Amino acid sequence: MWQNKLKELQEENRLLKKEVALLKGRSSPEENTLLATQTDWSQFKNLCDHLQLPLTILSDFEGSGIEYCNIAWLKITGYSLHEIHLINPVFLVHPDHKKIVTDKIKQRLDGDHQDYSYQIQIRTKHVGFKWVNLTTS
């Protein structure tokens, strides 16, 4: 089910990129860059906010690196948007699964851009831990 949603998102992203390319022909290079960035992020966020598939984007894994998460992710974790942006992502990973997660992140940072999918437990605000399927890309 989530694979179908991912394909829909990829197609939507492809179409959005085409629209941005058309818009770029109507403005200066500086305006193009700003417009594309604002348009891409706004449309991405608009599309992803209400997906039933939980989605989170990490900017780093050391500090408070949760750059974006959608409503489904907030529902699973039980944290508010404000709280989730203050949390170190490592805090959310069950101690038994931290090694696999940090190993995969190190591989990614070392240039391995292979997609991974595995199950881990994450810490929630009220229930303890929940199993989730984690997919990186």
Image (cartoon, rainbow, N blue to C red):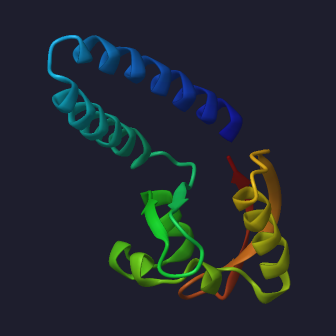
Above or below, 132 against 114 in this view is below
In the picture, residue 97 is in which quadrant?
A: bottom right
Residue 86 at x, y percent in the picture: 41, 83
Q: Can residue 58 be seen?
A: yes
Left or right: residue 74 compared with residue 10: left
- Which residue lies at the image location 36% right of the left edge and 72% below the top edge? 81
Above or below, 68 against 79 in this view is above
What is the quadrant of the N terminus in the image?
top right
Left or right: residue 2 compared with residue 8: right
Q: How many labels sit on residues?
A: 0
- Which residue lies at the image location 39% right of the left edge and 49% below the top edge? 49
Q: Can residue 1 be seen?
A: no
Task: Farthest residue to the front: give it.
Answer: 29
Residue 111 at x, y percent in the picture: 75, 51
Above or below, 11 against 107 in this view is above
Residue 119 at x, y percent in the picture: 82, 63
- Which residue lies at the image location 52% right of the left edge and 63% below the top edge? 73
- Which residue lies at the image location 41% right of the left edge and 22% below the top edge? 17
Residue 11 at x, y percent in the picture: 53, 21
Q: Nearer the viewer, residue 79 or 114?
A: 114
Left or right: residue 54 compared with residue 79: right
